[in-house]
Image: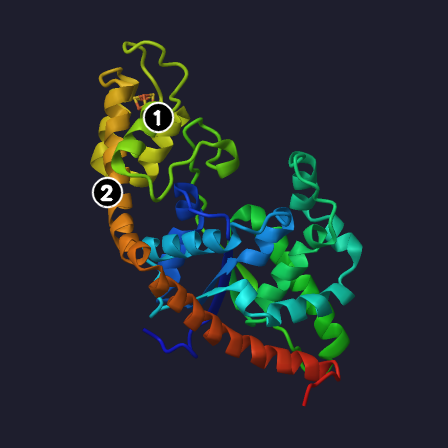
């Protein structure tokens, strides 16, 4: 393994929204686990970001952060191979966020696609706050404070990384005339497998269609039993098509080639029933989830172990953040020394 100073640095975070589901695993965590040896990785729990939409009641924030960390560890993130930390324990992020908020034009934030989309779609909360409009600025601070080389993202989040790059550029134009202070990170496009929820829509907590990483085997099997299938298969004797069936999508991600061949043949010829087919995908899911649940148990039984990991990670991240803030303050003639 190359030493940490030869490896490129990767930065990514997840909001502290509580226990994670299979969509979080396939869309992000699984890739993070693979990256641990290839890159110098910083993965953080974004508890301040959770406040941008859920600011009124903070009673669950800490508990939710712990649940996210337990799922990080369950999925295979290893504190010996990556740095895991909690955003609010590295307050330097807030200082850089404030400085960026001085230089970021409002128009840049108003045109972020998710801003308008979420304001239109989330009607039960008042999102007309300064914090919600400014969350991409906080995101830019989260990334740039580590001078990250790469940010692993799906296609839909590329505009966020682009905004971070624009903020870095603008900062460097103002304060880094001799040499850029903040390097522009690149998006690292991660394979975006289509992971449907039990109702066939994208798996998401807000749709109530999730399979959680902590779901025990009987719950996984029960959820799959009720999962929607190819609507053309009304009767057992109707042939179906795994390419238009959400259960087929799960097979493509989790099942072996042999099982996939049986599904393709059996579904298209009506040789198998959907119940049998769902049983096979449940088998594959249980194989993925059980080792995670075993790893998680050690920390569930002793949450202090998990908090210790976060504390050590936050201290290590704080050192890097501090060094960047020294450069930033010096470049703006605002050194504390
Ligand atoms: S047999 Fe499987 S892939 Fe085919 S429609 Fe039923 S659940 Fe979907």
Direction from residue 307 to residue 46 in the image, left or right: right
| Quadrant of the rendering where the C terminus is positioned | bottom right
Position of residue 216 relative to residue 303, above or below, is above
Pick whichever, 5 or 140, lies toward us.
140
Is any atom of residue 260 visible in this view?
A: no
- Residue 265 percent location from the top left of the image: 25, 23
Looking at the figure, which quarter contains the N terminus? bottom left
Give the label on residue 287, or none.
2
- Label 1 beta carbon less than 8 Å to ligand 1: yes
Badge 2, how many Cα within 10 Å: few under 14, some, many 20+?
A: few
Query: Is the distance from the Cβ of mark 2 to the nearest ligand 1 atom less than 8 Å?
Result: no
Disc 1 element: helix
> What is the distance, in whole Å, between disc 1 and disc 2 at their CAs?
21 Å
| Location of residue 318 in the rendering, given as x and y in whole percent from the top left corner | 52, 75
The residue that disc 1 covers is 242
Give ligand 1's quarter of the image: top left
Whether 200 is drawn above or below 120: the answer is above
The quarter holding residue 184 reads bottom right
Q: Which mark is residue 214?
A: none
Which residue sits at x=75%, y=54%? 108
Q: In this view, does 334 lie to the left or right of 55?
A: right
Callout 1: 10 Å neighbours few (<14), some, many (20+)? Answer: many
- Where does residue 246 sit, x and y in percent of width and height? 39, 28
Horizontal side of 29 relative to 155 (left or right) equals left
Mark 1 or mark 2: whose residue is earlier in sequence: 1
Tag 2 secondary structure = helix
């Amino acid at each position: 393994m190359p030493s940490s100073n030869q490896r490129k640095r990767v930065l990514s975070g997840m909001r502290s929204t509580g226990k994670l589901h299979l969509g979080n695993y396939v869309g992000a965590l699984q890739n993070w686990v693979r990256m641990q040896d290839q890159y110098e990785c910083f993965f953080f729990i974004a508890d301040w970001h959770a406040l941008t939409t859920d600011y009124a009641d903070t009673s669950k924030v800490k508990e939710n952060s712990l649940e996210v960390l337990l799922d990080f560890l369950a999925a295979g993130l290893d504190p010996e191979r990556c740095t895991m930390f909690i955003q609010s324990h590295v307050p330097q992020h807030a200082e850089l966020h404030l400085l960026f908020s001085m230089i970021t034009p409002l128009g840049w934030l108003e045109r972020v696609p998710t801003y308008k989309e979420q304001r239109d779609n989330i009607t039960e909360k008042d999102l007309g706050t300064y914090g919600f409009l400014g969350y991409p600025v906080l995101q830019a601070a989260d990334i740039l404070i580590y001078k990250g080389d790469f940010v692993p993202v799906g296609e839909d989040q590329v505009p966020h990384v682009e905004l971070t790059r624009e903020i870095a550029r603008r900062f460097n134009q103002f304060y880094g005339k001799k040499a850029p202070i903040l390097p522009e990170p690149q998006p690292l496009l991660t394979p975006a497998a289509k992971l449907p929820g039990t109702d066939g829509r994208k798996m998401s907590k807000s749709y109530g269609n999730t399979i959680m990483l902590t779901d025990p085997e009987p719950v996984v099997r029960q959820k799959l039993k009720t999962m929607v299938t190819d609507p053309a298969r009304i009767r057992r004797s109707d042939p179906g098509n795994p390419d238009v069936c959400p259960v087929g999508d799960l097979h493509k991600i989790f099942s072996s080639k042999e099982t996939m061949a049986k599904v393709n043949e059996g579904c298209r010829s009506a040789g198998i029933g959907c119940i049998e087919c769902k049983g096979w995908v449940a088998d594959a899911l249980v194989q993925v989830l059980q080792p995670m649940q075993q790893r998680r148990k050690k920390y569930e039984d002793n949450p202090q172990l998990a908090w210790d990991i976060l504390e050590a990670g936050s201290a290590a991240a704080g050192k890097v953040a501090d060094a960047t803030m020294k450069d930033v303050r010096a470049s703006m003639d605002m050194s504390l020394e």
